[in-house]
Amino acid sequence: MCGIIGFVGKDEQAAPILLDGLERMEYRGYDSAGIAVRSEAKGLQVRKAKGRLKVLSDLTQGGAELEGVLGIGHTRWATHGEPNDVNAHPHISENGQIALVHNGIIENYLELKEQLLKRGVKFTSDTDSEVVAQLLEFHYNECHNMLEAVGRCLRRIEGSYAFGIICSDYPNALIAARKDSPLILGYGESGNYIASDVTAIIKYTREVSYMDDGEIAVITSNSVDVFDDELTPVDKKRSVVDWDVSAAEKGGYAHFMFKEILEQPEAVRRTVSPRIKDGRVVLDDLDLTADYARGISRIYMIACGSAYHVAVVSKYNWERLLRRPVEVALASEFRYSDPLVDEHTLVIVISQSGETLDTMAAMREAKRRGGRTLAIVNVVGSSIAREADDVLYTWAGPEIAVATTKAYTTQLVLMDLVGLYLADLLDSVEQAEYKAILEEIQLLPEKMDQLLEQVGDVQYFASRYFNHTSIFFIGRNLDYAIGLEGSLKLKEISYIHSEAYASGELKHGTISLIEPGTLVVALGTYAPLFDKAMSNVVEVKARGAEVLSITTESFRERMEKTADASVVVPDSHPVVQPSLGVIPLQLFAYYVALQKGCDIDKPRNLAKSVTVE
């Protein structure tokens, strides 16, 4: 799992392009890297190394050491076998004919490996991916045709994959294949590309196609031919990437995460502005009628990680607005829970990348059971976007930091818009409240800008509290929901243990963990339950906790009488307030991690797009 790039050029050397593409995908997280390049004079040349990409770059003198216009590269996040030079990709077949890079997991690799071992094949790594390289060689020796060998191999393997394959017998051809793991084709003037992420090749081309499950592509310097799983030719639609390469660069900021936090006002503006006309929510891409809405008996919201936390916020808001039952489900659990889905079930699928394998599998299960699926994603042309019955894009622009920020807030505000749209269809919201919520949504970018002027305050509090080893986030209702996201942000980039609790649950066990000096981040932005929230702040203070509060202008004075420190956010409608309340939590996590010297954009053990179960 992680980054794949491949290049077939006319005259341009492959290795520097491969290294540059891998560098642009470093944000995805990895523990080793490697490249394979073929030349007429030297055949297949493979270099790979554990650790950061710089180790590989130094090993190859920035790619200058490797001659050839055809190559593949990979950054690996270990699933089978420890991170080391041997387990790094590319993997080479036993006789050195075939080099392969792989994202995904081969579920029946042990069975296949045992069959190959019985035939005398020798393995060098502990990975499932090497099994495919050896199996390819076996079938290639049978049929002496690489495309046919790939087809035979794919019919035998089970699991998820994106493959980039080169063979020493084919001096100007790269083969790619895909199932349940993203892979794109890039069309350039000096050659053609494959990549798991458009970020890797945007410097070289904006013209791309998105491979579908079961497809195989043969890429040369002059052509890209795509086939289905029966090796029948397929015509691929080409798309043009419409964001500028600078959007995927730091632009002078120390970290992508900080840059993306500051980009949130504009990202929200892009998400909202085209969807509000004449004081109404207009979702031209969504074909939901009032009759269909009235027939909805249940709504599921399915997601992982931060997207799951968006769903938790949205459950509160949608049940209030729609008066329909909403169930939030972890995608990794949903399809194993025998979910109650039928033709009267609306299933909302939330994913930043649109490639999250757990979420994709859950969506497919919902469709199999007859549910209607609506995808909320950021990446145009992604797998979830293509397979869902309906899709709405967040238009957040590329998000590079592993810890999501602007993708979260744009998902949140888009879910608010969809909730309002459905409530209007159902006539379940008073028009005065509809108007008030919509006005506050339109004011969000301005209020976010205002809030981000307090960056210095949050930085100070982070410097004051960064040395805590355990931090608790508490809140009620929507405050609890954004506390979940604040806790996740902190733990994933600073490695501090943190947990979020519905503060009413403290007295049912958790308060036993509060002792003198414990830091509690208390959320007090949800106006209907502010008094209840304050009583919980008093409870933890009585046990010796130090309290950092997040509250609104309206409640500043009351909160500051009890809390040790406060960050104040602008007032908004309760439905919209979480989009503001979460920003100080993002900044707090960022500055705590900065104080601790952590690798903020590439936290340990994490990947941006999780394409394995």
Image (spheres, rainbow, N blue to C red):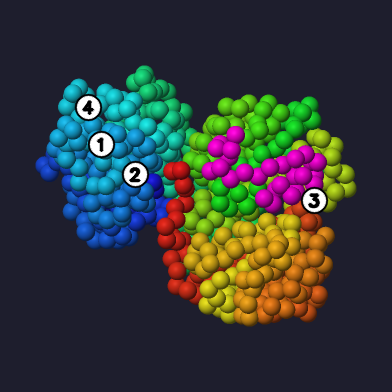
Q: CA distance from mark 4 to mark 2?
A: 24 Å
Q: Which residue is mark 2?
A: 5
Point out the tag, 1 or 4, that comes first from the N-terminus.
1
Q: CA distance from mark 2 to mark 3?
A: 45 Å
Residue 31's place in the image compared with 140, above or below, is: below
Q: Is residue 437 left or right of residue 515?
A: right
Q: Amino acid at mark 2?
A: Ile
Residue 265 at x, y percent in the picture: 64, 57
Q: Is residue 159 magenta?
A: no
Q: CA distance from mark 1 to mark 4?
A: 14 Å
Residue at the (68%, 26%) spot, across then down: 343
Q: Secondary structure at mark 4?
A: helix
Q: Is residue 327 magenta?
A: yes
Residue at the (29%, 34%) spot, across then down: 111
Q: Secondary structure at mark 3?
A: helix
Residue 72 at x, y percent in the picture: 28, 43
Q: From the viewer's perspective, is the residue at label 1 or at label 3 nearer?
A: 1
- Dot 1 and dot 4 residues touching (CB under 8 Å): no
Point out the tag, 1 or 3, that comes first from the N-terminus.
1
Q: Amino acid at mark 1?
A: Lys
Judge the density around disc 2: few (<14), some (14-19), many (≥20) Cα neighbours within 10 Å: many
Q: Quadrant of residue 30?
A: bottom left
Point out the tag, 4 or 2, that comes first from the N-terminus.
2
Q: Amino acid at mark 4?
A: His
Q: Which residue is mark 3?
A: 437
Q: Which residue is mark 4?
A: 139
In this view of the protein, can residue 209 be seen by the observer? no
Q: Which residues are magenta?
A: 312-338
Judging depth in this view, the residue of 191 and 378 nearest the camera is: 378
Q: Is residue 441 left or right of residue 69?
A: right
Residue 580 at x, y percent in the picture: 69, 60
